[in-house]
């Protein structure tokens, strides 16, 4: 019913074994046919155990461990930065959030239609700029002289 844990003092081997079991629980909890409340409770206990004991096992000051720690921190920061940039790009896409809201109410077919309309709008803008630059501007320039 609960995550693997032992209340009394544990040896490093027992801690490693319990860490392995708790990590296995964290990975496979989704597959269990239990109520969500029970899954969350077990998952919370397993993650707490792993967080508590992971630091104890890896408290060495070797340069390899320090480098691994900073590499992990840097990779997490980089992934977060990439996610934030992707979210920002979604926000910059015209009407993206409105189309997402429409999609949530009416489905992906309607959202695809509005995405197509947005594409047609941009094609129309490009063609209008093309006509303006290569037809209207020379006409105005050479007729005025």
Image (cartoon, rainbow, N blue to C red):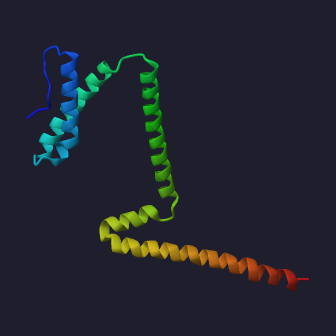
Q: Position of residue 22 (x, y in %)?
A: 20, 32
* Residue ranking furthest to the right: 145
Quadrant of residue 62 in the image? top left
Q: Position of residue 114 (x, y in %)?
A: 43, 73
- Quadrant where the C terminus sits is bottom right
| Front-lying residue, 75 or 86 | 75
Residue occupying the point 50% across, 49% down: 85
Q: How many marks?
A: 0
Residue occupying the point 51% across, 64% down: 94
Q: Position of residue 75 (x, y in %)?
A: 45, 37
Left or right: 7, with 70 as reference point: left
- Quadrant where the N terminus sits is top left
Left or right: 67, with 1 as reference point: right
Q: Position of residue 32 (x, y in %)?
A: 13, 46
Left or right: 134, with 3 as reference point: right
The image shows residue 98, relative to residue 29, as above or below, that is below
Residue occupying the point 19% across, 43% down: 28
């Amino acid at each position: 019913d609960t995550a693997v844990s032992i209340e009394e003092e544990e040896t490093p081997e027992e801690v490693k074994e319990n860490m392995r079991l708790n990590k296995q629980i964290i990975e496979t909890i989704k597959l269990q046919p239990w109520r969500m409340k029970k899954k969350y409770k077990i998952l919370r206990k397993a993650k707490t155990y792993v967080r508590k004991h992971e630091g104890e096992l890896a408290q060495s000051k070797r340069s390899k461990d320090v480098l691994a720690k900073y590499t992990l921190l840097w990779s997490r920061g980089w992934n977060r930065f990439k996610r934030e940039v992707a979210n920002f790009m979604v926000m910059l896409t015209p009407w993206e959030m409105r189309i997402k809201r429409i999609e949530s109410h009416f489905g992906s077919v309607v959202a695809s239609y509005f995405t197509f309309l947005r594409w047609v709008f941009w094609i129309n803008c490009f063609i209008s700029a093309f006509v303006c630059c290569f037809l209207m501007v020379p006409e105005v320039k050479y007729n005025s002289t």
